[in-house]
Image (cartoon, helix red, strand yellow):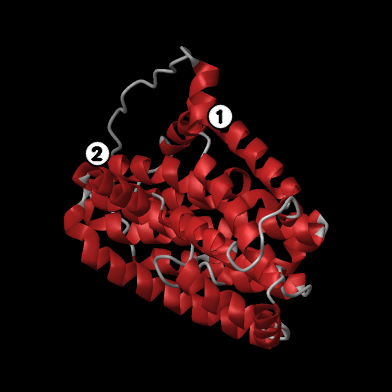
C-alpha cells in the first residue's frame, strides 16, 4: 500500500498539471452528466496538430539535427559574452519551430555541458534564466511555437501573419531586453574544448519517436477541454467567468497564467470570451513571471537543479526578478499601444 501511495505521489509530482487537470475534470463531471456531448468539447484540431508537431520534433531530435547544427556554429564563438548570447538566442530561434518546451529540453543540458567545459559555472544561473525567457519569447513568433498558441490558433483561426503582427511589439521589446542584459556578461576569452562525437542510434527508431511524444500533454488538453466545457454548462460558473473575463482578457490572461500556467489559461479564457487577440496577448506575456507561469519555466528549472541543486534558491531569485521586470515592461507596452 505504501509503495502504491509513493508511486502515485511521485507521478503527481512529475505530471502535476495533468494530475490537477484530470481531478478537476472528474469533479466537473458530477455537475454535468457524462455523455457523448463531451466529445464536442474537445478541439480535436488542436490535439492532432500538437501530436504531429511533437512527432516531427522527436524525429529531428533522434537524428541529433539540432545538436549537430549548434556544435558547428559554436566553433565561431570566441568569448564568454558571445557564448551566452549564442546559447540564449539558440533557444529563441529554435522555439519558433520546435516549441519552447522542446527547445529547453534540448538546449539547457547542452548549455550546462558547454559552460562546464569552459569552466564558467558562474554563468549558469544567468544563462539558463535568459534562455528560458528567450524560449518563451521566441514561441510568440509563430502559432506553432508553444502549446498555448496552438490552442489559440486553432480556436481563433487568426491567419499566421496577423498572429505574428499581433505579438510583434512584445517580441521586439523582449529581444531588446535580452540584448541589453548581455552587457552584464563579462567579455572574456574562452576556448571551447572538443565535444564527444555524436552517435546517432538508428535501432528501433520509430518506436523511440512514438515513445518520445508527450502523451500526458495531449491528455492534459483533453481533460482541460472537458473541464471548460462542463463549466460552460454550469450557469453559475458561466455567468461568473464571463463577468470576470469579458473586457479584461489581457489582465486575466496574465493573472491566471501565474497560478495555473498559460496553457490551461488559454483554454479557460477562450471558453468564455471571443476576444481572441486580447487572450493571445495576455497568455503570451503571462508566460513570464512565476515559475509555473509556463511549463517551459518548470522544465529548465528541473533540468538545472537535477545537475546543480546548490543553485536552486539563487536561480529562483534571479529568474523571478528578471521575469517580473520584463513582464512589467510588456504590460507597460500593452498600455502604450492601446
Name the spot of residue 283 as percent of width and height, x first: 60, 69
Residue found 65% across the figure and 81% down from its top: 241
Residue 60 circle label: 1
Is 255 positioned to the left or the right of 122 in the image? Answer: right
Q: Nearer the viewer, residue 48 or 23?
A: 23
In the image, is residue 110 above or below residue 271? above
Local packing at callout 1 (Cα closer than 10 Å; few below 14, some 14-19, many 20+) is some
Residue found 30% across the figure and 67% down from its top: 316
Name the spot of residue 105 as percent of width and height, x first: 43, 44
Q: CA distance from mark 1 to mark 2?
A: 25 Å
The residue wearing badge 2 is 117
Name the spot of residue 82 as percent of width and height, x first: 40, 51
Dot 1 falls on a residue whose secondary structure is helix
- Dividing the picture into quadrants, the one containing residue 113 is top left
Contact? badges 1 and 2 (CB < 8 Å): no
Name the spot of residue 280 as percent of width and height, x first: 68, 68
Residue 319 circle label: none
Residue found 73% across the figure and 52% down from its top: 43
In the image, is residue 99 above or below residue 152? above
Local packing at callout 2 (Cα closer than 10 Å; few below 14, some 14-19, many 20+) is some
In the image, is residue 45 above or below residue 32? above
Q: Nearer the viewer, residue 80 or 124?
A: 124
Q: Quadrant of the C terminus?
A: bottom right
Amino acid at each position: 500500500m505504501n509503495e502504491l501511495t509513493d508511486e502515485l505521489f511521485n507521478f503527481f509530482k512529475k505530471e502535476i498539471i495533468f494530475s490537477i487537470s484530470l481531478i478537476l475534470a472528474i469533479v466537473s463531471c458530477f455537475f454535468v452528466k457524462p455523455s457523448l456531448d463531451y466529445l464536442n468539447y474537445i478541439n480535436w484540431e488542436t490535439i492532432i496538430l500538437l501530436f504531429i508537431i511533437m512527432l516531427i520534433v522527436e524525429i529531428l531530435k533522434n537524428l541529433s539535427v539540432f545538436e549537430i547544427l549548434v556544435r558547428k556554429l559554436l566553433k565561431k564563438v570566441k568569448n564568454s559574452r558571445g557564448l551566452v548570447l549564442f546559447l540564449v538566442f539558440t533557444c529563441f530561434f529554435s522555439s519558433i519551430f520546435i516549441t519552447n518546451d522542446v527547445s529547453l529540453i534540448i538546449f539547457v543540458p547542452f548549455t550546462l555541458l558547454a559552460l562546464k567545459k569552459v569552466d564558467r559555472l558562474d554563468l549558469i544561473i544567468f544563462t539558463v534564466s535568459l534562455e528560458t525567457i528567450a524560449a518563451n519569447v521566441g514561441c510568440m513568433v509563430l502559432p506553432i511555437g508553444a502549446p498555448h498558441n496552438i490552442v489559440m490558433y486553432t480556436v481563433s483561426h487568426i491567419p499566421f501573419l496577423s498572429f505574428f503582427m499581433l505579438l510583434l511589439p512584445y517580441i521586439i521589446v523582449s529581444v531588446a531586453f535580452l540584448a541589453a542584459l548581455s552587457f552584464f556578461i563579462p567579455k572574456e576569452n574562452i576556448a571551447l574544448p572538443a565535444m564527444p562525437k555524436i552517435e546517432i542510434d538508428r535501432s528501433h527508431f520509430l518506436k523511440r519517436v512514438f515513445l518520445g511524444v508527450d502523451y500526458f500533454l495531449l491528455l492534459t488538453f483533453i481533460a482541460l477541454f472537458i473541464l471548460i466545457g462542463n463549466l460552460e454548462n454550469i450557469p453559475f460558473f458561466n455567468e461568473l467567468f464571463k463577468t470576470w473575463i469579458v473586457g479584461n482578457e489581457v489582465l486575466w490572461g496574465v493573472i491566471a497564467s501565474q497560478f495555473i500556467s498559460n496553457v490551461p489559461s488559454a483554454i479557460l479564457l477562450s471558453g468564455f470570451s471571443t476576444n481572441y487577440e486580447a487572450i493571445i496577448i495576455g497568455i503570451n506575456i503571462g508566460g513570464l513571471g512565476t515559475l509555473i507561469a509556463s511549463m517551459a519555466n518548470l522544465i529548465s528549472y528541473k533540468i538545472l537543479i537535477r545537475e546543480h541543486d546548490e543553485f536552486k534558491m539563487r536561480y529562483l531569485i534571479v529568474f523571478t526578478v528578471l521575469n517580473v521586470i520584463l513582464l512589467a515592461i510588456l504590460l507597460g507596452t500593452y498600455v502604450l499601444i492601446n
